[in-house]
Image (tube, rainbow, N blue to C red):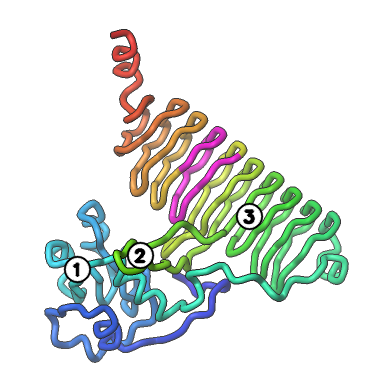
């Protein structure tokens, strides 16, 4: 991940310190010579990063990772390249959380932005931006020309908003990069910390969320919708995708171009939605799934498996539309 302007980063740390922190077994004897500069996803990791592999479904990515070390298990370590040091632990997500907190000790909670000022005090910085009443703006915020921000909205520090955007009233935006001609309706919350917790019999552990939200050109977000920032990678909504009211997008979700998502849809963490996908109201999509291009999902469906491109599915669990109709006739 490129340096994140939204969170102060600590480190680097010797790999030996990380090994000690997670109490793992290490096959390589050369690990003490390495310094680690961050925690990254398998895809984005560089030679100075540590990554993690917690499911065999990501083996295609793990075999190509550039990370110097990977937090994983005894069973999954065989899916790493030879030059990647395997850090084998019993609880992968717990270990990743512990390491993430080393680099980002304050990313497990959403601390209030104490640098907010009323937009009336800084109108000279944004001469071609229209502000409603009681709009609060943080430090280093960039707002493009001909953008409108409605009353009682909060734009926190380091947020970037492009040109010709429409931000409604009572909107909160943090940890977010917004491109041009984006519309966010009243009451929406963008860039909030996701529901990232590691269950433990002794005490549940909050997981840091160090990613951000990226909204590309011509995206529309309906009223009272919530879009969580990424936990490690970013949450991304591609261009010309429209969300209806009260839609929830969880951390790390990637949504393609030209999608239409109806009201009260929930998409769980790390799901990948292709281009030109239509999702009916109140449908739910489980985490870590892949929904192909041109898929149509019926309203009220529960998707618990990957859906191939050009499919039409409906029901719970969601099945091919033709099969759903046959079942209803019985």
Q: Residue 179 carries which label?
A: 3
Foreground disc of the pair 2, 1: 1
Q: What residue sits 51% from the left and 42% below the top?
A: 257
Q: Which is nearer the eye, 74 or 130?
A: 74
Q: Residues within 10 Å of mark 3 (few under 14, many from 20)?
A: many
Question: For the view shown, which residue lies furthest in the front direction?
Answer: 202
Is 248 contained in the magenta span?
Answer: yes
Q: What element carries label 1?
A: loop
Q: Point out the stretch of residues depicted in magenta.
A: 246-266
Foreground disc of the pair 3, 2: 2
Q: How crowded is mark 1: few (under 14 residues within 10 Å), some or many (20 or more)?
A: some
- Compared to residue 46, the image places residue 243 above or below, namely above
Q: What element carries label 2?
A: loop
Where is residue 40 drawn, in percent x and y?
37, 69
Where is residue 186 drawn, in percent x and y?
71, 46
Q: In this view, does 175 lie to the left or right of 107?
A: right
Q: What residue sits 69% from the left and 73% below the top?
A: 140
* Distance Cα–Cα, label 2 vs label 1: 19 Å
Q: Which is nearer the eye, 182 or 187?
A: 187
Where is residue 312 drawn, in percent x and y?
38, 25
- Compared to residue 3, the image places residue 199 above or below, namely above
Mark 2 or mark 1, which has the lower sequence index?
Answer: 2
Q: Name the residue under label 1.
A: 90
- Compared to residue 91, the image places residue 242 above or below, namely above
Q: Name the residue under label 2.
A: 41
* Residue 108 appears anywhere in the view: yes
Q: Do the residues labelled 1 and 3 touch (CB within 8 Å)?
A: no
């Amino acid at each position: 991940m490129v340096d994140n302007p939204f969170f102060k980063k600590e480190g680097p740390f010797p790999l030996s310190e990380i090994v000690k922190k997670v109490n793992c077994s290490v096959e390589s004897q050369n690990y003490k010579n390495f310094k680690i500069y961050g925690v990254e996803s398998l895809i984005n990791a560089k030679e100075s990063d540590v990554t993690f592999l917690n499911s065999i479904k990501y083996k295609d990515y793990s075999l190509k990772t550039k990370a110097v070390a990977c937090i994983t298990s005894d069973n999954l370590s065989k899916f790493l390249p030879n030059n990647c040091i395997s850090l084998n632990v019993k609880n992968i997500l717990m270990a990743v959380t512990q390491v993430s907190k080393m680099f980002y000790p304050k990313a497990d909670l959403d601390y209030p932005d104490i640098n907010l000022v009323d937009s009336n005090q800084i109108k000279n910085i944004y001469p071609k931006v229209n502000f409603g009443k009681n709009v609060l703006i943080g430090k280093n915020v960039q707002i493009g020309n001909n953008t409108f921000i409605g009353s009682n909205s909060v734009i926190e520090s380091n947020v970037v908003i492009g040109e010709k955007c429409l931000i409604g009233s009572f909107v909160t935006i943090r940890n977010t990069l917004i491109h041009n001609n984006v519309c966010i309706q009243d009451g929406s919350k963008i860039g909030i910390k996701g529901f990232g917790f590691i269950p433990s019999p002794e005490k549940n552990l909050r997981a840091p969320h160090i990613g951000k939200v990226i909204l590309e050109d011509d995206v529309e977000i309906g009223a009272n919708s919530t879009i969580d920032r990424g936990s490690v990678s970013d949450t991304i909504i591609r261009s010309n995708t429209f969300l209806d009211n009260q839609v929830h997008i969880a951390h790390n979700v990637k949504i393609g171009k030209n999608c239409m998502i109806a009201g009260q849809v929930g998409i769980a963490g790390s799901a990948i939605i292709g281009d030109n996908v239509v999702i009916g109201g109140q449908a739910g999509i489980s985490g870590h799934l892949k929904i192909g291009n041109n898929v149509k999902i019926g309203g009220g469906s529960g998707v618990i498996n990957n859906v191939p491109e050009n499919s039409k599915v409906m029901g719970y669990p969601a099945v091919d539309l033709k099969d759903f109709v046959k079942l209803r006739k019985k």
